[in-house]
Image (spheres, helix red, strand yellow):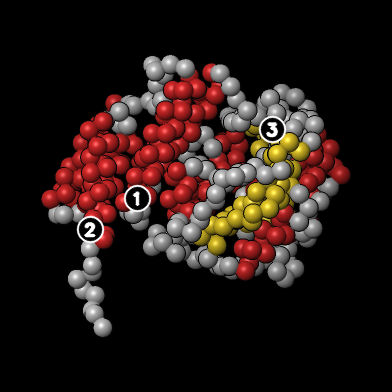
Amino acid sequence: MPPHAVAGLRRLRPSGRCTLPDSPTVSALVAVYNYEQYVATAIESALAQDYPAECLEVIVVDDGSTDGSAAVVKELIARHPGRIRLLRQENAGYITATNRAMAAARGELLAILDADDLWLPGKLRRSVQLLQARPRLGLVFSDMSVIDADGRVTQPSFVGDRRVDLSSGAFASLLVENFVTASSIVVRADLRPAFDPIPPGVPYADWWIALGAARSAEIDWIPAPLALYRLHTANLTHGASGAAAVREHRKHLDLQLFALRQFDLEELGPDELLAAWESVERNARGLIEVAGSAFAEPAEITSGRRAAVEPLLAGANAARADGDAHGEARLVLNALANDPSRLDLQARLRDAVVRARAMDAQPDPLATST
C-alpha cells in the first residue's frame, strides 16, 4: 500500500437498510443525457443482478435531457419502488452529472453504469466477492464486450490483445494508457477523497477514478466480459472521426498532462517516468496524424503553466546538485507537463533518467555481505 493511501480502508460490511451478511451496499451511478432508447435497458440490467435488492440502489442523474429519458426513468421508478432515485439538473455535462451521482450515493461501493451500456448477469456479485476477499483492493474492473446500437456483439473483448499489466503498479501503467472502462468499475466509497469530485476539465471519469484509486489502494481486474459497451454514433468518446477525432485525441492528452501536473510522482521509478512522457509524445504525434496537419496544436499551453515551469526547474537544479537524479527527472517531467513544447526539457528528462538508472544499479553501500 503506498504511503499516501487513504486511511481506514476496511473490509466491506452491510449498512443502512441492507442487513444481509456479506452483502455491502452498492450505489449504481447512471448519468443520462438524451439516451431515451437505451437508459431503461441499462437500469434494468442493474436491477436484474443476482444481488440483494435491499443492498443495491440505482442513482440516475438526468443531465438536462431534451428527449424522454426522464419519463422512461420515472416509469421504471413506478415499477420498482424504492430502488431508483432520479435527480435532475440543467445540462452541465457528463462529469458534473457523475459528480452529483457520487455526492448522492449512500453505498459502501460505487459502481459506474453508463446509460447506454449494460451489466451482464453476475457482474456485480463477482466484483463484490473479489473486493471482499482482498481488503487492500480498492477498485475492480473487468473486460467488456462491444455491442452495436441494436445490441449485437461486434467485438467479444473490449480489451482485445492489449496487455493489462498491473504487476509493477497500476498507477504507472494508467499514466501511459487507460484500460479501465466506466461500466466495468466497482470502487470502494472509502476512496472517494482520492477522486471525488472529478475536477473541472477532466474529460474521462473512468480514467480519473482509476488513477485516483490506484494512488490510494490496489486495483485489479476480472479478465472476462462482465458488461456490454455500446458503440454507436452518439457515443461521447469512441467512434469519432475527422474534427471529432482530433478533439478526442486532445482530450486524451489533456488528461495525461493534467495527471502529471496534479499527482505526486515520487513513487515512480525512472523508467516509469520516461514511459509516461513517451506516451504523451506518442499521443501528440497521433493527434497530428489524425488532424492531417503539422500545425495542429496538440495541447494548450497557458501563461500560467509556463510560469509554473521555472520554480519546478529550480527544484530540479537543486536535486541535481544533491546528486538526486530521480528527483531531478520527476521535477523535469512536472515542468514538461506544464510546457510540453520545451525540447530542452525533453532531452534533460532522458539524461536524468539515464543517470537515475545508473544510480539504481549501484550496490547498496549499507547492504552486508554474507
Which residue is drawn at the image coordinates 52% and 34% (left, top)? 203
| Dot 3 amino acid type | Leu
Label 3 close to label 2 by CB (< 8 Å): no
Q: Residues within 10 Å of mark 2 (few under 14, many from 20)?
A: some
Mark 1, mark 3: which one is toward the viewer? 1
Amino acid on which disc 2 is placed: Met
**Residues tagged 1 and 3 counted as in contact (Cβ below 8 A):** no
- Tell me, yes or no, if residue 338 can be seen here: yes
User: Mark 1 sits on what residue?
Assistant: 271
Q: Nearer the viewer, residue 59 or 112?
A: 112
Tag 2 secondary structure: helix
Q: Which residue is mark 2?
A: 359
**Position in image of residue 122 (x %, y %):** 76, 56
The image position of residue 345, as x and y in percent, is: 24, 36
Tell me the element at label 3. Answer: loop
Q: Residue furthest bottom?
A: 370
Mark 3 packing: few (<14 Cα in 10 Å), some, or many (20+)? many
Mark nearer the N terminus (1 vs 2): 1
3 or 2: tag closer to the N-terminus: 3
Please tell me whether mark 1 sits on a helix, a strand or a loop.
helix
Indicate which disc, 1 or 3, sits on the residue closer to the N terminus: 3
Gap in angstroms between the C-alphas marked 1 and 2:
13 Å
The alpha-carbon separation of the residues under discs 1 and 3 comes to: 35 Å
Q: Is residue 267 left or right of residue 39?
A: left
Q: Amino acid at mark 1?
A: Asp
Q: Which mark is residue 231?
A: 3
